[in-house]
Image (cartoon, rainbow, N blue to C red):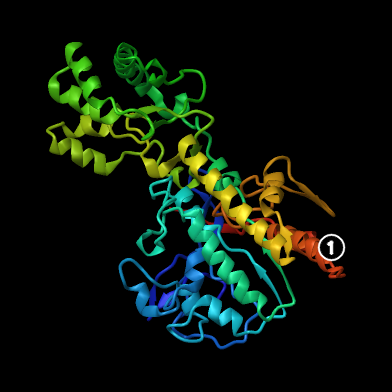
Amino acid sequence: MSDNIGGLLLNGEQITNTKLILDVGASGSPAPTNIQGTPSTEITNTLSGSFNNMGVPGAKSYELLAPGYGNAAGLQAEPKTANPYFVRFRSSAETTVLKDAVAQNPTFFSLWIGNNDVLGYATSGGVGVNQTGNLDPKTYNRNDITDPNVFANFYSQEVEALTASASGGVLINIPDVAATPFFTRIPFDPITPAALGDRITQLNQTYAQLNQAFAFIGVPERSIQFSTTGPSAVVIQDESLTDISEQLTQVLMAGGLPQTQATIYGMQYGQARQATENDLILLTSQSAIGTVNTERVQELVGLGVPQELAGQLSINGVSYPMEDQHVLIPAEQEEIATVTATYNATIEAIATSKGLAFVDANTLLNNVANGGVMYDGGIITSEFATGGAFSLDGIHLTPRGYAVIANKIIEEVNETYNATVPKVNVGTYRGDPAIGSGVME
């Protein structure tokens, strides 16, 4: 990077955001925000090697073998076929990450790939596709889950290529993405009586009519009600539920609602329910909860609903269910857990068969999330912004978090190869987020 602002330029145009800092907003509450400033890292000014770190942020397992992954022209294609971080240091426009790595003739290597094969699906709230059964990664989108057999095939090729010159190496498995602050920071019940104000009575009256319809149809568990004394769960869209839109419309019409209103309610709440502690609300959804969904307002106005009423019916998580991209429901979590376990079985099996060191990062980071991990001088946890393990995006580790991982890698390498690599002093690495001094607009 050419500066400490973060962000990247492509032919002088900014293409990625600057780094996050913890800034204090007008309300007095700290929140992640992008630091002000203009990036100066022009990715087409490629760097020459050799390199010891061939890691490419955002890469999926099969993309390490994709020709042209470092071709800047691919960033302007749709869908994109290149990665700006690899453009920055690739040896040629049509090379592959693996080819450049092998060209270094490593005597020892570490391989930590596969997180992004499932991460995009998770951080998008499961809007992608679980491609299990589809063996053609060229047909995948960024938010899709990679088929486990595709993962195993490409991962095996990568290990084979890296072991050609190396006398040893270490393979690192894939953490449980759902254990990160990105999915645990926002509670399922963030709505307070104070936030609802004098709307709470009207909301509960409206939902009482819907709840009667839910009970009549035979799904009373979908009932929605906001507490007048404590926190309430957000209303969410759950695509795993049976769609009862048509039934709901008919029942509401039979109960006396005008057809237009009954139809709108039917469409809006046909797969709705209040969240439970088993749902994961995304960190990025914090800014949406309780705000008016302008797109939904436009839709309702187009259906003939008055502007004011349309606004009342379009409050995210309150009168309008939080859409798929804001919530990871249990069915989606199960998909992620299943494929992660399969990936990890592949990684461990290959490590065993090749006699390579193996690091169980999944268990280590689960321990960080469940009580924390001790180091000389303190404890590191997954608590957002204060736990020391995770950065402000809620996904990537801090330097201190990576130091904990590094020590585990060193421990396994020393044991496997009877080596004496010294461990790092975890406490000397930053675990606190950067603090901003400005006021967020």
Residue 336 in the figure: left or right of residue 140: right
Residue 145 in the figure: left or right of residue 414: left
**Residue closest to the far front:** 353
The residue at 62%/72% (across/down) is: 160
Is 174 or 329 nearer to us in this picture? 174
Amino acid type at circle 1 is: Glu
Tell me residue 302's x, y (percent): 14, 39
Residue 270 in the figure: left or right of residue 221: left
Tell me residue 423's x, y (percent): 82, 65
Would residue 398 be seen by someone viewing this image from the given angle?
A: no
Check the picture and name the quadrant holding the N terminus.
bottom right
Tell me residue 352's x, y (percent): 72, 60
Label 1: state its secondary structure: helix
Tell me residue 263's x, y (percent): 18, 26
Is 129 or 303 nearer to us in this picture? 129
The residue at 59%/57% (across/down) is: 396
The residue at 47%/25% (across/down) is: 232
In the picture of the structure, the residue carrying the numbered disc 1 is 415
Would residue 245 be seen by someone viewing this image from the given angle?
A: yes
Q: Is residue 400 above or below residue 244?
A: below
